[in-house]
């Protein structure tokens, strides 16, 4: 098999996103760019130059409809989440390009093979009371750690490698140490049950009854990626590479909540990908 170059991988991911966006618009399914993809769209008009993934989010109702309807719409792409695959090993979903094969070396043998992909996250409500929000955040963080420990294998953490934080090497070493302990004690935990519980807890807070919403099945550095509910009452298209995709009308608030000074990139020596995978063309020698 022939390994994809970074530029080929980005093009494959962009093509997946184009197909997903087209499907969503045809079926009135709401989506928006999130995480580093939204940051890249606003700061770079495309991929963050040293990054190699695409993230989008959907309100829970749209997320469930998408994973119910998408498969079969394009023979090349396949969507997986706990909603349509009982053996899925993550709290969120992915759409993969079946003409590629990806080996993710952080995962145990039964999970490590997939395809070049884009990530899709469900959006749920966030409690307005401070204590309840902190309890939800702690609960979901613990469940994330348990679920990941049951699916991951012993590989050093690169979590902070592309951050603007201080003491990055030390923090990565501490995180690696904690990760190894959790993996050791996480053997035997049922990955799917943990992440199903995580989603069930998240769904207790409907968007319609919440002033703040966010990605509550995925926690980045001990906080939710969040924004006001009114921020997704409307969507705007933003440029990403050679196309335009939807962002929430409150994307500035989201980026400030998630990244702080989002227009300032990390120092040059930290402009690296933190992923641990290789991707190959399935039928190319």
Image (cartoon, grey):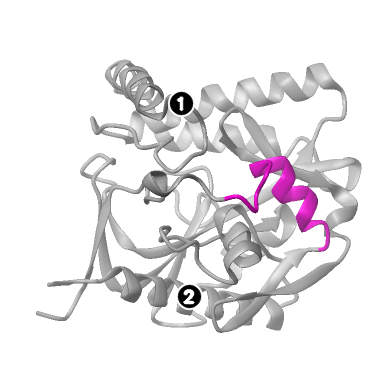
Instruction: Choose top left, top right, bottom left or bottom right for residue 281.
Output: bottom left
Residue 134 sits in which quadrant? top right
Residues packed near mark 2 inside 10 Å, few (<14), some (14 to 19) or many (20 plus): many
Q: Return the residue nearer the eye: 237 or 62.
A: 237
Q: Is residue 96 magenta?
A: no
What residue is shown with label 2?
14
**Where 282 sits versus 68, above or below?**
below
Q: Position of residue 194 (x, y in %)?
A: 49, 31
Comparing 119 with 257, the one in front is: 257
| Residue numbers of the magenta segment | 249-264
The image's mark for residue 260 is: none
Work out which residue is located at the far left of the displayed protein and give it.
285
> Callout 1: 10 Å neighbours few (<14), some, many (20+)?
some
Q: What element carries label 2?
A: helix
Which residue occupies the foreground of this view, 268 or 262?
268
The x, y position of residue 241, in whole percent, is: 54, 78
Location of residue 20 in the rendering, given as x and y in whole percent from the top left corner: 57, 75
Q: For the point 41% across and 82% down, which residue is it?
A: 75
Question: Residues under labels 2 and 1: Cα distance?
Answer: 30 Å
Give the residue number, with chain letter if any, for mark 1: 145
The residue depicted at 54 percent of the width and 50 percent of the height is 265
Q: In the image, is 39 to the left or to the right of 5?
A: right
């Amino acid at each position: 098999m022939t390994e994809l170059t970074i530029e080929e991988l980005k093009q494959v991911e962009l093509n997946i996103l184009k197909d997903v966006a087209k499907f969503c618009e045809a079926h009135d399914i709401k989506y928006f760019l999130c995480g580093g993809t939204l940051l890249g769209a606003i700061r770079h008009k495309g991929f963050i130059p040293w990054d190699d993934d695409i993230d989008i989010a959907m309100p829970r109702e749209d997320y469930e409809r998408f994973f119910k309807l998408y498969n079969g719409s394009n023979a090349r792409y396949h969507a997986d989440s706990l909603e349509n695959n009982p053996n899925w090993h993550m709290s969120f979903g992915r759409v993969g390009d079946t003409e590629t094969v990806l080996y993710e070396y952080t995962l145990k043998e039964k999970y490590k093979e997939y395809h070049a992909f884009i990530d899709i996250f469900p959006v749920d409500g966030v409690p307005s009371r401070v204590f309840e929000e902190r309890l939800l955040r702690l609960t979901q963080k613990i469940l994330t750690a348990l679920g990941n420990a049951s699916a991951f294998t012993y590989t050093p953490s690169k979590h902070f490698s592309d951050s603007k934080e201080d003491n990055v090497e030390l923090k990565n070493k501490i995180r690696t140490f904690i990760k190894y302990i959790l993996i050791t004690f996480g053997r035997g935990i049922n990955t799917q049950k943990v992440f199903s519980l995580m989603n069930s807890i998240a769904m207790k807070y409907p968007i319609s009854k919440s002033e703040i919403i966010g990605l509550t099945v995925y926690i980045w550095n001990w906080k939710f990626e969040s924004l006001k509910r009114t921020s997704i009452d409307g969507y705007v298209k933003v440029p990403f590479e050679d196309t335009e995709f939807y962002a929430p009308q409150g994307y500035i608030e989201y980026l400030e909540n998630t990244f702080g000074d989002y227009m300032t990139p990390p120092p040059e020596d930290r402009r690296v990908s933190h992923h641990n995978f290789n991707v190959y063309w399935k039928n190319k020698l």
